[in-house]
Image (spheres, rainbow, N blue to C red):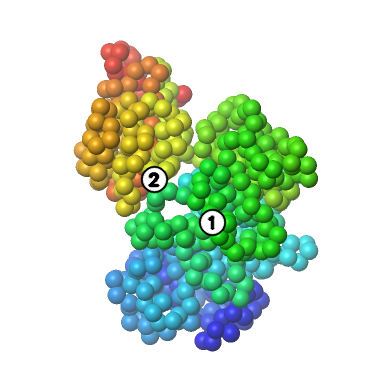
Amino acid sequence: MSADRLDALTSWYADWRGLKVAVLGLSVTGFSVADTLAELGADVLVVSERADEQYARLLPVIGVRLWTGDLDVVPDELRDFAPDVVIASPGFAPQHPLIVWTRESGIALWGDIELAWRVRDKVVREDGSPADWVLITGTNGKTTTTRLTATMLAAGGRRAAPFGNIGVPVLDAVRDPAGFDVLVVEVSSHQLWYLGLQTRSADPVSPHAAVCLNLADDHLEWHGSFEAYRDAKAVVYAHTRVACVYNKADAATRAMVEEAEVVEGARAIGFDLGVPGPSDLGVVDGILVDRAFLEERRTSALELTTVAALAESGLAAPHIVANILAAAALARSLEVDPADIRDALERFELDPHRIQVVAVHEGVTWVDDSKATNPHAASSSLAAYPGAVWVVGGLLKGVDIGPLVAARGGSVKAAIVLGSERDEVVSAFARHAPAVPVFEVDAAETENVMAQVVDLAMEVVRDGDVVLLAPAAASFDQFASYADRGRRFAEAVRERIAAGSADGGERDDHDAAPDAGA
């Protein structure tokens, strides 16, 4: 197919009929891509190692073919299909054989975000324009900030909701017949890598506002290097129209904005926990303020909320306050009133497994931050709970945990190490925090891991202590997901409480345990 034909496909109402598209992967994202293309009249072949039974049953109903099998080599079925476009699910890394073959063959390679942008006009607003997009990425805090932004926009009367890497594919949002004013899209570094391939697109993704919250080592096994990971994250700012929001405390995000090719007139908006400049959001004497989106910003500021009010809602941890400021900047770029932002924050609750207190008993607090799947996220948790008994370990994803242990490990009361890469964590403590007691969880069965974690924690806790699950690693070596890991931790804590209560609550001081139902 000619490049001109592909360049013309920038509307739902363009002629997609007969376009031959290979969709790689049959996760929730892959199915949304296949379903969309089928509705557009394209000729679609899904290629996947395995297929969820529900999706496999639905594909022939919508007129899509499915091939499953070994993907270590390019299947003959894919070669014979000779696709005009390949659309890959985010799990397919740049070095995957199918991605290498696609690029070497000169076949157009898209991700789901590219397709969603091209067909974004299926449902339009009253003025005939498609919904605005807000893009959110970062090593940590993406999901919280995405939910915060959507909540603030909704409080301000906009039809908005969170989509993308947060769970609901953006293609589902684009096709929703009710329509939206704003799509708040969490984008992973994987999705951004694919988006970055479209440097010559006739209609590039051009968000109203975008943010990269922070940058630290993560997903290096997927990208191949930190530099490649950084370059993928930087794509979030490309062609931004109104506001490039960046973290003043993270020089890498400032550099991304400075280097980005944006629409003329787009502003750089900074945020951090310090006193803000005249184009920033920040904190002054415990008050979160906006000095970016008001005409008198050089001499005054708008109050958004206070740290004390956030503390009442469990939102006062420093990294959560930073997320709130980033989300507020995005919402303010769409003219949401400060009063609406305050109202949204009064109703907002953090996701499960994000610094979630699961029990408090006899002075011991048990905290589930299973969503801290990399060292950067775990560092924020440890800063919020200094002196905690730290539950750490899992799949490190190619990241060196040594710098985190050097920076934070010496201040913890003890470390309980789990996961398949325990040796790396134990070695890091031996090098950087040798005085800290380290306990290893050697349970082979998933069902027994967290029970052993809790039993080990009970050996060292005292009144006033915190036990913090902040693994700094992925969960897939022993658990189905970070949510599964966090759920099992909470269950083990509560079971241990119940067992202690059944025994009459009598135990030695060094066996302090939490209270059920707290």
Alpha-carbon distance for marks 1 and 2? 21 Å
Crowding at mark 1 (Cα within 10 Å: few <14, some 14-19, many 20+): many
Q: Tell me the tag on residue 329.
A: none
Residue 114 vs residue 202, the one in the foreground: 202
| Position in image of residue 131 (x %, y %) | 68, 61
| Position in image of residue 129 (x %, y %) | 73, 65
In primary-sequence order, the first of circles 1 and 2 is 1
Q: Which residue is mark 1?
A: 256
Which residue shows up at 54% across the image and 79% down it?
A: 42
Q: Is residue 294 above or below residue 92?
A: above
Q: In which quadrant of the rendered view does residue 306 lie?
A: top right
Residue 116 vs residue 134, the one in the foreground: 134
Which residue shows up at 50% across the image and 51% down it?
A: 252
Q: Is residue 512 above or below residue 123?
A: above
Residue 430 vs residue 155, the one in the foreground: 430
| Position in image of residue 200 (x %, y %) | 56, 75
Q: In which quadrant of the rendered view does residue 508 lie?
A: top left
Residue 243 vs residue 461, the one in the foreground: 243
Which residue shows up at 55% across the image and 70% down it?
A: 115
- Name the secondary structure under disc 2: loop
Which residue shows up at 71% across the image and 51% down it?
A: 334
Q: Which residue is mark 2?
A: 374
Name the kind of residue labelled 1 in the image.
Met
Name the kind of residue labelled 2 in the image.
Asn
| Position in image of residue 366 (x %, y %) | 40, 28
Q: Left or right: where does residue 197 sit relative to residue 474?
A: right
Q: Is residue 133 above or below residue 361?
A: below
Query: Can see residue 495?
Result: no
